[in-house]
Image (cartoon, rainbow, N blue to C red):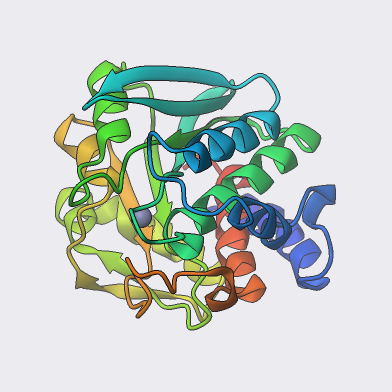
Amino acid sequence: MSGRFRIRWSIWLLVLLAGVSASPLGARRPYVVLEEFCAIGERVPGTAGHREARDYIIRNLENPQIDSFYARGVTFYNILKRFPGEHTIGIAAHWDSDIGCPGANDGGSGVALLLSLADTLEKNPAERGIDIIFFDGEDVGKADRIGSQHFAEQCRDEYSFIVVIDMVGDKDLQIFQEGYSVRSFPLLVDSLWEIAMQAAPSAFIPAVRYFIIDDHVSLITNGIRAVNVIDFDYPYWDTRDDTIDKCSEESLHKVYAFLLALVYGDRS
Ligand SMILES: [Zn+2]
């Protein structure tokens, strides 16, 4: 990691440390976005909540690309916000929720961070290319990952890598490395955790705890370098108690600090 990198992202981190109540880089705070997004309720594909959540994401992005496709009797929507540049990385999350689960942390936390990050990048352009990707249909069936499969099959791999974030709003935030990511790209995972542990020292742990089927698996099996960032120790996972009161603004800001370090940091 270069000295230039340390200085640059330290500036962003100082802005963040001004307080979680501040608006980092003048953009919308992730927790405020999460509150609005959770007010919609469940986002099961084919339902009114799904359409409302889709419209919420679209109207909070400037000129997004929408890829709609039909599968299993339902229309799905992958939403992409592109910030063009070299050495493009992807930051991804799924936006749907499972049947009977409000999905505040599972799905919602990632959406809140991605929309805040998009707002930040509009106001403070990064040097490298950034694609912000909202996958639909992850929670259909037993993590069938319909949107990310569709994306990966069509994708001309132009990414340095894609980071898939999910379930990162837990009050007790502990983000271990994920097994399939480490098995496929051990050096990439280590370098990402090095950045993350500087940005949010208490939240990221450089050891594997679980192997998790999430959208990164669709990407990896289609030849795309992808890493999952997830805190799977969450007792409310896949229950009707996955609500915003189980999430914390401080946790969201820790992961936000990591994302800011990633997008504004060195290209190495
Ligand atoms: Zn999820």
Compared with 165, 169 (above or below) is below
Left or right side of 174 for 207: left
Residue 62 visible to the viewer = yes
Q: Position of residue 163 (x, y in %)?
A: 40, 46
- Residue 60 position within the rendered picture, expressed as x and y whole percent measured from the top left: 70, 35
In this image, 213 relative to 137: left or right? Answer: left
Query: Could you tell me which residue is drawn at 64 percent across and 75 percent down?
Result: 250
Q: Is residue 199 something one can see in this rendering?
A: no
For the residue pair 217 and 150, the one nearer the viewer reads as 150
Compare residues 158 and 112 and report the one nearer the observer: 112
Task: Pick whichever, 173 or 66, lies toward us.
Answer: 66
Residue 67 higher or lower than 2, as above or below: above
Q: Quadrant of ligand 1?
A: bottom left
Q: Which quadrant would residue 6 be assigned to in this image?
A: bottom right
- For the image, the number of numbered tags is 0
Residue 14: name its quadrant: bottom right
x, y (%) of residue 213?
Answer: 20, 54
Which residue is rendered at x = 18% and y = 52% of the image?
142
Q: Position of residue 43 (x, y in %)?
A: 46, 46
Task: Identify which residue is drawn at 32% across, 71% down.
Answer: 232
Q: Residue furthest front?
A: 48
